[in-house]
Image (cartoon, rainbow, N blue to C red):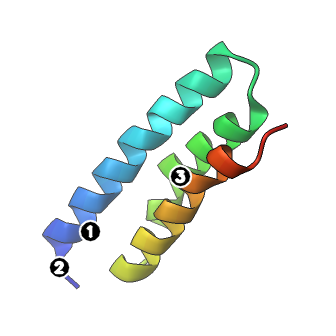
Amino acid sequence: MSTEAYLFWGLIFGSIGVGYFMYGKKRPNMVALVCGLALMIYPYAVSSLWAMIAIGVVLMAIPYFVRL
């Protein structure tokens, strides 16, 4: 596993998570809020680079497909 790649993808998904979190907080959108929190936290729990990328892409797509 490349540490640089892992840090890079963690930074990308964390930044997108901050954006989702701020959007979900500003407008009462619970799906974006929860996905933003998950995008910020999950890189700490996943040790595989490819699993981290796959989970991140799925978490980024959830607010687009789920409208509450």
Above-or-below relation of 63 to 58: above
- The residue that label 3 is drawn on is 60
Comparing labels 2 and 3, the label whose residue is closer to the camera:
3
Disc 1 target residue: 6
> Is 9 drawn above or below residue 22 in the view shown?
below
Query: Which image quarter holds the N terminus?
Result: bottom left
Q: Earlier in the sequence, mark 3 or mark 1?
A: 1
Counting from the top left corner in percent of width and height, residue 36 is at: 57, 41
10 Å neighbourhood of mark 3: few (<14), some, or many (≥20)?
Answer: some
The amino acid beneath tag 2 is Ser
Q: Residue at x 74, y 28 (%)?
A: 29
**For residue 2, above or below residue 62:** below
Q: How many marks?
A: 3
Q: Position of residue 5 (x, y in %)?
A: 19, 69
Q: Amino acid at mark 1?
A: Tyr
Q: Which mark is residue 65?
A: none
Residue 61, quarter of the rendered image: bottom right
* Mark 3 and mark 1: Cα distance apart in space: 18 Å
Task: Pinpoint residue 3: horizontal percent, then vertical percent.
Answer: 18, 73
Residue assigned mark 2: 2
Identity of the residue drawn at 57% across and 31% down: 21
